[in-house]
Amino acid sequence: MFVERKAELILPSGFDNIESYAATLEEYLSSELVQSLLNGHPNEIAKSGPPLAWNEWWKWASSLNSGDIPLHLTESIKLDLPGSLSKLLRDASRLALPRASVPHIPLPRPLPKGQTPKKVHEVRHFSKLIAELSADIGVDNIVDVGSGQGYLSLELASKHGLNVLALDFSEVQTSGSIHWAQQAKEQNLKLSHVTHHISQATLPGLVQNWIDGRHLARSNRNVIVIGLHACGSLTVEVLRACMDNMKPQDDGAADHWKIKACAIVGCCYNMLSDHDKHVSRLTAPPLPSDAFQLAAQPWLPPSPAELSLTLKKITYRALFGRLLYEKDIELPTDTRVRRLKDSAYSNWGTYIQAASSRMGVSPQLLDINSVWTEEMRQLSTTVSMLHVLRSKLGPVIESWILLDRYVWLCEQLEEPGLASVEMKWVFDSGISARSAVFIVKVLHY
Ligand SMILES: C[S@@+](CC[C@H](N)C(=O)[O-])C[C@H]1O[C@@H](n2cnc3c(N)ncnc32)[C@H](O)[C@@H]1O
């Protein structure tokens, strides 16, 4: 079914072809335990109780101390896990696509104004990749989709001398991008900005206007389309537009511009439209929206302090919801606790005051006292463990999403011999979690 180009997508060890990897991933993600975890949001489980299939691990987790939970986020799990969980976690690490380490590029000191160390890392690594791609195929017109504050566009234009079109649908982002370009105070920067919604339908016209406006010679009308963290459906829309353009067109448009390559890193899978969640002909596991949320989480475990705060946020919210449920207090569906200050989580008593005031519920009505009972302690360790287990599934779900996109690009472009398709890791996963870049290059130019 697939043209095997293993070198262009490194599979987990033990798999030597995409078909068997895809089938194993699909089977794992469709299994009863994984499905029940994906569909078991802590807020709902705190109200309804665990499904029967969780009896073994739920009982075990309720006997844990909350301090034991973080151990389960590390690779070397020290505690004796119930059999069903140890298999679940072993398979989760076995099936996630292996993340290659990337060469170290030192950060400049001081850091460029406006950018975090994470952003500088991303811009350094991605701009190097794009500059090499540009030199490799001899194309220096770059279209940066979802350019945000334009740090990448600016680096490509100023450091690498490329012609860049920075596209974003947000006026605020474009203004920021123009501001940083002015701050650079460089003469002859070949950098343009356009604010416009990008989709499969609009991208061709936006590029065409840019190319036409520059009166380029026919030989120089080729472009590379790039995207750094093109969130949600933007990645898929742009890849679709690239595929349309890369396929041979029979409209005789000899002086049209052509996309000769694209390099896109996606992010925010939780923002994908339904029809962009599964694009290839692979059989897809049923993935609820929570699964896409989990796939978009940081890849490395948080620090113990971050984890402790996260677990408090999750368990306090779930226990508070359960209290409302037990007291039969119905609130309008759009009433939410939403974000509270971190100090609201210092203890249960502080939290219930803050949460009930945010929800407009009188503490008298709830008849709450701030005692942390044994039952609540148990529910809090089980709900914490549920969170840990769900987050362990994130990398496997992301692997499924990436595999689906890779196979889809191969189906469209590589199998007919039109282009080469590669997926590689471009950032240090500990610094930037969404690190997979799809590089598609037209084969005959
Ligand atoms: C996660 S940010 C990344 C920004 C930038 N590439 C970076 O890495 O710093 C995604 C950007 O894409 C823009 N964006 C998202 N969907 C878009 C669409 N359909 N059309 C145009 N811009 C879009 C957002 O406004 C945002 O600036």
Image (cartoon, helix red, strand yellow):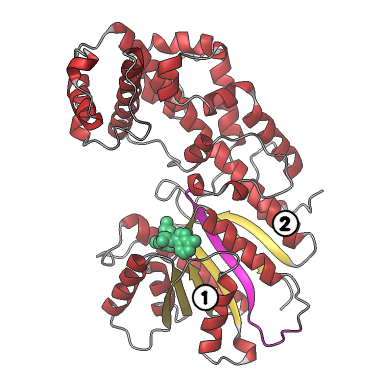
- N-terminal of the two: label 1 or label 2? 1
* Left or right: 355 in relation to 317: left
Q: Is residue 102 magenta?
A: no
Q: In the image, what residue type sits under mark 2? A: Cys
Instruction: Tell me where residue 214 appears, x and y as whole percent.
Output: 51, 89
Q: Which mark is residue 437?
A: none
Q: Is residue 206 visible?
A: yes
Q: Is residue 80 above or below residue 345?
A: above
Circles 1, 2 touching at the beta carbon (< 8 Å): no
Image: magenta residue range = 252-268
Residue at point 22%, 35% (across, down): 342
Tell me the quadrant of the picture where the C terminus can be found. Answer: bottom right
| Residue annotated with mark 1 | 142
Nearer to the camera, 94 or 316: 316
Q: Viewer-proximal residue, 321 or 247?
A: 321
- Which quadrant of the structure image shows residue 440? bottom right
Q: Residues within 10 Å of mark 2 (few under 14, many from 20)?
A: many
Position of 416 with respect to 36 (left or right) is right
For disc 2, the marked residue is 410
> What is the x, y in percent for residue 93?
56, 32
Tell whether 1 sits left or right of 337: right
Ligand 1 location (quadrant): bottom left
How far apart marks 1 and 2 lie (CA) works out to 23 Å
Decide: few, some or many residues near mark 1? Use Cα within 10 Å; few <14, some 14-19, many ≥20: many
Write the residue at 24% across / 16% down. Answer: 366
Residue 75 place in picture, x, y as percent: 47, 30
Compared to residue 44, the image places residue 275 above or below, namely below
